[in-house]
Amino acid sequence: MRLSWARQAERGLLGFFVLALIWAPVPLASNRGWGVAILAAWVGLLLSGTLALQAWTVCRQRRLSLHAARADHRRGRHDIVDLVDLNPPGSTRGAWVVAGLLALFGLWASLPLLGVGETADAFVTRQYVLRCATYTAAFVVVQRLVNTPRRRLFLMSGLLAAGVLQALLAVVLFSAGGQYEIFGHPTGGSTRASGTFANPDHLAQFMVLTLSAGIGIMLAQMGGDAARPRNGRERLLALMRFVMSPKMLVRLLLVVLVITLVLTRSRAGNGAFFIALFLLCGWVMWTSPRLRLPAGLLVVSLLVVDLVVIGQWVGLDQVVQRLQATELAQQAEAAASGTPGAPPPRREETMEERLRAAEDALQLVRLKPWTGWGGGTFHINFPAVKQQALPLRYDHVHNDYVEIAADTGLTGLALLALAVGLTVWRVARLMSDRTGPLDRGIAAGVGMALFCALLHATVDFNLQVTTNALVLTVLLAVAWSVPVPARADRVKSR
């Protein structure tokens, strides 16, 4: 059957949106003013094109409805059905509630620019509001375009492709071992892979988000109703079919992402991923009997192959050493090897120092608990409350919750918390056997990404990085694009 022009246009718009997700991490994670402007223009044009296309479709449907009563009944009905199928039932009311919460957050952050409240730097706050508008626009684009299981799989595959391309680039740059510049930012020559991100921890979060998308794809492909092999011959045939199937390709791509995640040496990134992996396995095995065996096999393969074998090869022990490098251990080592009375040599920031900076930043929240100090102005306001015991300069505090509350107040933090909480509730509803295998696997991947992001946010500032916040918003939108199946008792009552 030949696709209509409007349906082809929708697919083209979705393809350009996936290209935007692939481009976003390249220019230093789009975390510079010019990078934000390019990404905002890209997503804004896609949103305008999507809304214009669907407005044209609605107008055409109405015109055909008016002519149907006068024209041939069969032809008129055929045209109308073809156009109605073009836009199947998509977003629920809950999806637009979440989109409204994201829009309200951006509006709340823009109030100082409108004369309500104050900000220390209007230019920085404008960039902050522009990024919030970009995230909201991306959420709406997903709701309008990703309205079929095939498109959801395509979008999740696009996220996986973005992660793989970034992982390959990061491994190549890390293997070179030299100094290099990316858009004027010096990097390289470190023991940690960072790719095109300014910070290895931010690359780790991007790897975790795309890993979650890949794991969702794997679970979606494993959740069918195929008969289990009964003897050795059928098991061998099943293994050969797996090796020759797209599942094997996805599994190999997950290996590449895990290698890059380990090479970042990120303590919170690696820890959050494997904790989330265990919890996801337990949740899936509890809520979905059909996915118990596939989820268990996937987790075991990730732990045995990726963690034990490949992890040891690429230096997982260095991640463990960074986890063990507490402030007390560094002070004891400095006292044993240093000169008496000399300041202890600094190696890197410890977890204790990160928590201490977050404790100092809470003073900003206490001074302006509801309105905050202005979006993106944390680096300007923090020196006034920073303790002298913290020798480093902090552009961001290593706690997203504290920084969001300091910038936009508890009101802004509550708006985002409500949007995330509703999405978590949505994912929990989708994790049942009433949902199809594809949508159930995608929901599992989104749930894992949410858990990792929320856990990592307690010791880092990934939500302040444009690319990571954008990818997380897209995953939120994907969860709301999946329809929740009706209960059997409700269907029978109808």
Image: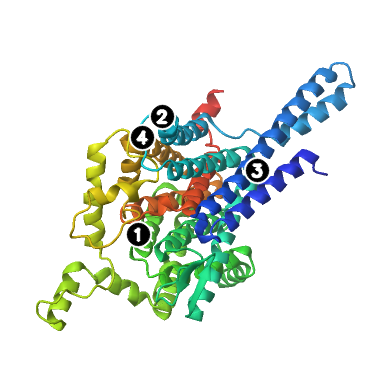
What kind of residue is marked 2?
Gly
Q: Quadrant of the C terminus?
A: top right
- State the residue in front, 337 or 112: 112
Pointer 4 or 3: first along the chain: 3
Q: Is residue 28 above or below residue 421?
A: below
- Residue at point 85%, 19% (across, down): 67
Pointer 3 or 1: first along the chain: 3
Q: Position of residue 18 (x, y in %)?
A: 62, 52
Q: Is residue 78 above or below residue 209?
A: above
339 sits to left or right of 257: left
Question: Do callouts 3 and 2 mark residues in contact (Cβ within 8 Å)?
Answer: no
Kindly report which numbered mark, 4 or 1, lies closer to the viewer in this rendering.
Answer: 4
The answer to which quarter of the image holds residue 239 is bottom right
Distance Cα–Cα, label 3 vs label 1: 36 Å
Using the rendered image of the protein, determine whether residue 371 is visible from the camera's viewpoint: yes
Kindly report which numbered mark, 3 or 2, lies closer to the viewer in this rendering.
Answer: 2
Distance Cα–Cα, label 4 vs label 1: 41 Å
What kind of residue is marked 1?
Ile
- Residue at point 52%, 29% (across, down): 93
Residue furthest to the right: 72
Using the rendered image of the protein, determine whether residue 226 is visible from the camera's viewpoint: no
Pointer 3 or 2: first along the chain: 3
Kindly report which numbered mark, 3 or 1, lies closer to the viewer in this rendering.
Answer: 3
Q: Secondary structure at mark 2?
A: loop
Q: Which residue is mark 1?
A: 275
Q: Which mark is residue 118?
A: 4
What kind of residue is marked 3?
Leu
Q: Which residue is mark 2?
A: 115
Kindly report which numbered mark, 4 or 3, lies closer to the viewer in this rendering.
Answer: 4
Pointer 4 or 1: first along the chain: 4
